[in-house]
Amino acid sequence: MTTLDRLPTALGRRFPRVAWGLAALRGWLLDERYPVAVDLVFALAVLALTSVAHGRDLHGHPWALVIEIALTGPLTFRRRAPLTVFGVIAGVAFVQWLTYQAMPADIAVLLALYTVAAHSSRRMTLLSYLVAELGVVLLVSNLRHVVTPVDPVEIWIRAAFMLSGATTAAAVLGLNVRARRAQLRALRERARELEHQRDQQAALAVAEERSRIAREMHDIVTHNLSVMVALADGAVYVNPISPEKATAAMRQSAETGRQAITDMRRFLGVLRADEPDALRHPQPGLGQLAALTAQVRAAGLPTELRLTGPAGAVSPGAQLTVYRLVQESLTNTLKHTAPGARAEVTVVCSPGSVSIEVRDDGRALRRPAGDPLGEPGHGLSGMRERVAAYGGGLSAGPLPQGGWRVTATLDLGPEDPGPEPAPAPAPAAEPAALPESEESPR
């Protein structure tokens, strides 16, 4: 921090108005938007100060004022063209030193050298520094005309040391200012990059959250509506023959609708912290698979559930994923198979993984054109995304003897070893897995 930086802080407590004025002056002097106007004021100030210091000689040599103007005037454009300004001032100073003695306006050479060091390359700074040192040699050589009782050699050494030190100080100060500005530019650029990365991460987080919400809404709405449609169709079909069964089907449809509302309130409770029913409706897990299969059986799809292994070792998030996978698979079976199909759900929990298998033996149902239930959806892609979040894999495809099979494995990571799960039923022939880019109506 420079002295000019410290002044507003040091004076701010005792003289707030003075500190404010210094801060405003500093901001205007360092303003890069009006370099010529600021440097013009600076050049006039230098001319006034050097003229006051050289007042007596100016009366005896009026043409010296012309030299002072020639030395300080180019400072008006020192930031616009630092090398050109330094060359002009150095040329005027060399002519002056060869024909006349030194004057206070020679400080313009140091100011121009500082500007070159602060705004130009190091090579140009070194070249300008050597030119300024050559001027020091010329200026010291003119001291031979000075009559003094002191040894001339000592005068030359002292003068050379002082002038060369001032020249070096001007160059070093300019280099330090340039390095500080470069550091500030790098910090600003880094801040912009970090802000851009933050915005990108926020956008990615929003997109991921939207995808998660879309998956949850798809699973909740599609499953419950599919069950309600199946129950309503069954009620219409059996109403002329058995009104009691039709009434039971409609009641089951109403119960399914209430369950959908509960699921929606549960999901909204996760998204909204002020939802009062969030704690009363926890997310579904392995314990709700039995109710899910019972709901599907009531919709007309006989379903058998086999759950083995230590379910308590599975985290709530993984249990929700298993529940959604089974729910989506049974929904697809309910929507896309002909009447008379049967489904089997097998969930095997182990200390480090969970395996899911959902299969049916029904043939594909050909729905009329325009039926929304027959259009392909995004169920398989959503299931793959859920499984990929746990580092697992999913395959889905038709069975050789007819029907459909979905298998998935969730990697739960290292866990404490638990009891060995009961062996799963021997799987039938492995179905051909669909490519990742292919979406099936199932």
Image (tube, helix red, strand yellow):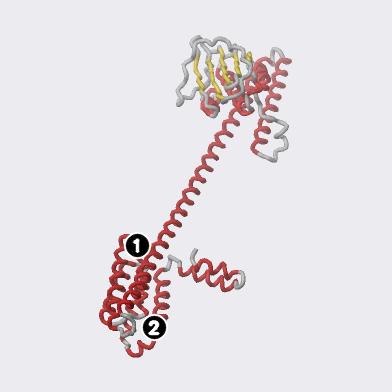
Characterize the local packing of mark 2: few (<14), some (14-19) or many (20 or more) Cα atoms within 10 angstroms: many
Q: Which structural element holds mark 2?
A: helix
Q: Is residue 101 left or right of residue 7?
A: left
Quadrant of the image occupied by residue 421: top right
Frontmost residue, 23 versus 102: 102
| Residue bearing mark 1 | 120
| Residue bearing mark 2 | 51
Q: Count how many numbered circles sit on residues in the image.
A: 2
Quadrant of the image occupied by residue 301: top right
Please tell me which residue is depicted at 34% across the width and 62% down the height of the picture: 120
Q: Earlier in the sequence, mark 1 or mark 2?
A: 2
Task: Name which residue type carries label 1.
Answer: Ser
**Image location of residue 62, percent across then percent down:** 32, 88
**Image location of residue 426, percent across then percent down:** 55, 9
Frontmost residue, 222 versus 183: 183
**Image location of residue 379, percent across then percent down:** 54, 26
Q: Which structural element holds mark 1?
A: loop
